[in-house]
Image: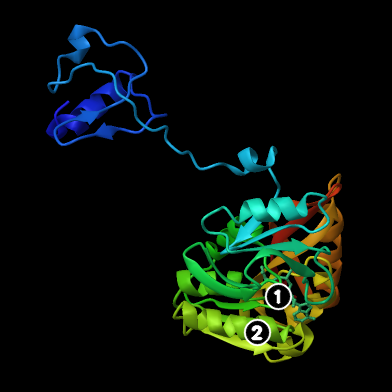
Amino acid sequence: MPKNSGETVRRYLLSLNALDSGFSIGRDEQYLYIPIIRQLTDEELAIGGAKLTECETEPVQKKASLEDILGFQPSYETIGSIAIIDALDMNAKQIAEALLTLKHVKTVLGAATPVTGEYRTRELVVLAGELNTETIYIENGCRYKLDLSQVYFSPRLSTERMRVAAQVKDREKVFDMFAGVGPFSILIAKRSPDSHVIASDKNPVAIKYLKENARLNRLSNVEVLEGDAHEVAKTVENADRILMNLPHSAHEFLGSALRSLRDRGTIHFYAIAPDDDPFSATIGMLRAAALENGFDIQVANTHIVRSYSPHRYNTCIDFSAWRL
Ligand SMILES: C[S@@+](CC[C@H](N)C(=O)[O-])C[C@H]1O[C@@H](n2cnc3c(N)ncnc32)[C@H](O)[C@@H]1O
């Protein structure tokens, strides 16, 4: 067809399911040559001055998928420009090279250990690409800079962070006891500009990024405190809401948390629990610990955040507590 009716004809052929997208469109001074996959009737051809002819065009180069390259779909997660895979996977090197073909991936890291230790970090080795473990990650409209080898971070908690942030009301004082690089605190502070968020962590590297992330997101309502949560809690009073996102040992900090709470407030308590009875033991423990500290509690919501290991869940219990 003449060049000026090319787009009309292309759309028309598409609507007839006659366009052959496996070949590129040919062109010369006057005409475009659009490949088709079947014979067209005279009636179908009577549009835009198109005629049938024969010519050669190039096949379209389709970008190979990871499955095309590897022969299987690898398991990986990406955080900003970094992809992470299991360093112990027998195909780790091949998977890493294949992941570098993804446009946004600049580095592939292998996790050599699970998340471990007080700071909840894992040992990471560079398998392919740039020698770098720092990246910028965007989640729920907030930007986070972080070094994956030195701080905890999991993109799998993004829905959970939004669930909690959506409950924060105007002018609340929020205490995020185990804030990491700030993904709960920053989101809450951004969504509720009238709130005052106190974000603390024991890991000095997490604190460095937390401060930087408050700046990156132009927030002036985040107060960053470095130190052990027991010590920091002594300096925090009258919090309306406390986040306790240290699932393996949050129970050890309940007394400190309750002392920082207003006479009536809300706590989001994270735990690891068996999948056959994920809540009752934790709720029993919470009630007993609250009574010991002069509080009663009412559970507002129980919730499975994600599966943690074959028979264990990462859970969250939201409860209100009031001084007796
Ligand atoms: C599971 S991570 C959660 C981080 C953050 N809330 C998030 O969602 O990414 C727990 C955090 O608690 C911090 N932490 C561990 N023990 C602590 C303690 N005794 N006092 C204060 N922070 C502690 C770790 O450094 C880590 O950043």
Between the C-alphas of marks 2 and 1, the distance is: 9 Å
Whether the residue under disc 2 has CB within 8 Å of ligand 1? no
**Quadrant that contains the N terminus:** top left
At x 46%, y 64%, the residue is 141
Q: Choose mark 2 or mark 1, whichever is in front.
A: 1
Task: Specify whether residue 294 is in view.
Answer: no
Residue 207 - label: 2
* SS label for mark 2: helix
* SS label for mark 1: loop
Callout 2 touching callout 1 (CB < 8 Å): no
Q: Is residue 174 above or below residue 9?
A: below
At x 68%, y 84%, the residue is 205
Q: Considering only order in the chain, which callout, 1 or 2, is on the residue closer to the N terminus?
A: 1
Residue 11 - label: none
At x 55%, y 60%, the residue is 162
Three-letter amino acid code at disc 1? Val
Of the four image quadrants, the one with ligand 1 is bottom right
Quarter of the figure with residue 22: top left
Whether the residue under disc 1 has CB within 8 Å of ligand 1? yes
Question: Residue 2, image x and y in percent?
Answer: 14, 29
Q: Residues within 10 Å of mark 2 (few under 14, many from 20)?
A: many
